[in-house]
């Protein structure tokens, strides 16, 4: 059974890179009929917050990733928050000490810093050994600290040898004998370091594939050594390449929004986000670009994940979002649009009671928007009475077109029913009788009614504006 996990630290929001990692882990598990696990890595008590955990979960759910086990769901391998697993880390750290594979260090951080500086000044790599760390303090000093109940840190004694990682994305990665020194696995406050907790958790949670960003590659060699020392089976690793901006520098605010939450607030659809994220370092076997989550689950695999950095292009994401908006069924559009319209244009109650009209109005502007945040502006043609454009009025008066609009107003007033077909028929009739050219008629008509020179299909717009509005806007213009 394939088991993957997404293991965010709740120290901030879900960013684009994290969402891509979560997506690939989710897809890989689902593609292979496996399980996807959410684990919260909150052992950095100072930087971790509950709000961040909640926002991570909300954003992951919004994207449509569903995990089989997690802090909000439970499962057979819990708890799924590292802060609730501390006793396990302590137990395994003690086991390594007992087996002579780890050791206590009573020296303080500043004392070790001095050692580090000394090694660097001697042009040596700042890699610690047991001898170095234990000779920092005299045996008497160690005794004194023990008596004063000072708690030691626990350091892992890294076996020096060459290690080869067969990464599912990067291929063969060699780590030389001297690539790492000994490192802390448990801090003096009893909390584990990332490299230790992650190994214990991935092993105990039976994770088969660790999929994460390649910024963790140098940690992987430490983790491999820990797996060996603990006698755990080593999972497969897949390290995803960095995401760069179009200018080939590391993705940052300069390239657009970086958090998923911001995209949601800016009116991007989760389907479009997921589709776009999937193409950051992966490609469809037939190079298709518009791919649903269901289809991604069928076709995704790690063999099409690229070693090269992915280039993030917000313009393309926005284009893609527009494609998804166009294809939204009316009822879904109505739901997705709501937070952008309530309370800006309508109250909660109005949104419900006017559902039929709002659905049609939304449909009428669908092809004009790329992101939902543009909706209030696009819908304003219906809701905001335009100012009378007196220059336009003077021109129309001179050219005699104004008369045609007077007839149009009368014709609309005397229509039996306010229906699209009848509006179309009577509008055409007035146009024909007026002998005005089509473009000299429709264009100003739109301007008179909306104050804009483009927008939704005109007859549909007239229908949705409603007879009362149309007649009063015409009247106001004509009588100005
Ligand atoms: N908590 C780590 C991070 O957010 C997880 C890394 C991993 O997937 O091993 O970067």
Image (tube, rainbow, N blue to C red):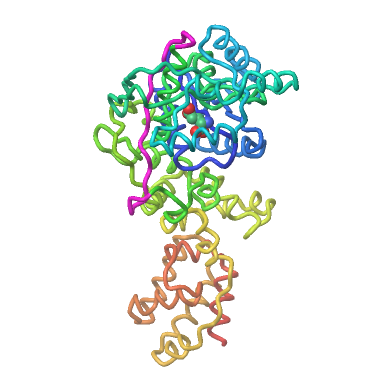
Residue 71 appears anywhere in the view: no
State the image quarter where residue 346 is shown.
Answer: bottom right
Q: Residue 143: percent from the left, percent from the top?
A: 69, 18
Q: Residue at x 60, y 33 (%)?
A: 109
Q: Residue at x 44, y 25 (%)?
A: 181
State the image quarter where residue 442 is shown.
Answer: bottom left
Taking depth in this image into account, of 370 and 478 the one nearest to the observer is: 370
> In which quadrant of the rendered image does the N terminus lie?
top left
Residue 78 appears anywhere in the view: yes
What residue range appears in magenta? 229-249
Q: Residue at x 43, y 37 (%)?
A: 120
As drawn, which residue projects farthest toward the left? 286
Q: Residue 16: percent from the left, percent from the top?
A: 46, 42
As drawn, which residue projects farthest toward the bottom? 398
Q: Residue 451: percent from the left, percent from the top?
A: 50, 75
Q: Is 276 displayed left or right of 406 in the figure?
A: left
> In which quadrant of the rendered image does the C terminus lie?
bottom right
Taking depth in this image into account, of 86 and 19 the one nearest to the observer is: 86
In the displayed structure, would residue 191 be above or below residue 322?
above
Taking depth in this image into account, of 169 and 420 the one nearest to the observer is: 169
Taking depth in this image into account, of 416 and 472 the one nearest to the observer is: 472
State the image quarter where residue 435 is shown.
Answer: bottom left
Residue 166: say if magenta: no
Q: Residue 166: percent from the left, percent from the top?
A: 31, 21
């Amino acid at each position: 059974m394939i088991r993957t996990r997404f293991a965010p630290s709740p120290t901030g929001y879900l960013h684009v890179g994290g969402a891509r990692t979560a997506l690939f882990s989710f897809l890989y598990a689902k593609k292979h009929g496996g399980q996807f696990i959410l684990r919260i890595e909150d052992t950095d008590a100072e930087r971790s917050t509950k709000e961040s955990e909640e926002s991570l979960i909300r954003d992951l759910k919004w994207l449509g990733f569903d995990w089989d086990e997690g802090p909000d769901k439970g499962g057979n391998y819990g708890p799924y928050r590292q802060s609730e697993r501390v006793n396990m880390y302590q137990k395994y750290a003690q086991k390594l000490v007992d087996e002579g594979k780890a050791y206590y260090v009573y020296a303080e951080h500043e004392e070790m810093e001095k050692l580090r500086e000394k090694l660097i000044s001697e042009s040596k790599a700042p890699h610690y050994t047991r001898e170095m760390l234990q000779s920092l303090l005299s045996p008497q000093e160690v005794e004194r600290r023990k008596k004063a109940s000072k708690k030691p840190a626990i350091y892992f004694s890294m076996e020096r040898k060459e290690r080869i990682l067969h990464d599912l994305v990067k291929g063969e990665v060699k780590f030389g004998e001297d690539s790492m020194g000994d490192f802390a696995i448990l801090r003096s406050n009893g909390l584990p370091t990332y490299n230790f907790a992650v190994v214990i958790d991935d092993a105990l949670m039976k994770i088969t594939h660790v999929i994460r960003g390649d910024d963790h590659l140098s940690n992987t060699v430490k983790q491999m050594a820990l797996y060996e020392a603990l006698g755990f089976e080593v999972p497969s690793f897949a390290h995803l390449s960095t995401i760069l901006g179009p200018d080939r520098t590391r993705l940052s605010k300069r390239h657009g929004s970086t958090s998923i939450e911001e995209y949601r607030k800016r009116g991007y659809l989760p389907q479009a986000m997921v589709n776009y994220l999937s193409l950051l370092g992966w490609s469809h076997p037939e190079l298709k670009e518009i791919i649903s989550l269901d289809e991604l689950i069928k076709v995704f695999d790690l063999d099409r994940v690229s070693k090269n950095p992915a280039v993030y292009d917000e313009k393309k994401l926005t284009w893609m979002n527009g494609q998804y908006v166009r294809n939204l069924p009316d009822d879904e559009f109505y739901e997705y649009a709501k937070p952008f319209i309530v309370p800006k244009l309508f109250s909660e109650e109005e949104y419900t009671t006017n559902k039929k009209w709002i659905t049609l109005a939304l449909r009428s502007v669908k092809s004009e928007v790329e992101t939902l945040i543009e909706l209030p502006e696009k819908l304003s043609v219906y809701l905001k009475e335009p100012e009378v454009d007196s220059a336009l009025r003077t021109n129309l008066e001179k050219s005699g077109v104004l008369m045609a609009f007077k007839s149009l107003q009368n014709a609309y007033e005397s229509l039996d029913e306010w229906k699209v077909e009848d509006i179309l028929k009577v509008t055409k009739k007035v146009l024909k009788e007026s002998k005005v050219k089509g473009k000299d008629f429709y264009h100003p008509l739109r301007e008179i009614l909306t104050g804009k020179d483009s927008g939704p299909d005109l007859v549909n717009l007239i229908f949705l504006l409603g007879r009362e509005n149309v007649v009063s806007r015409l009247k106001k213009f004509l009588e100005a």
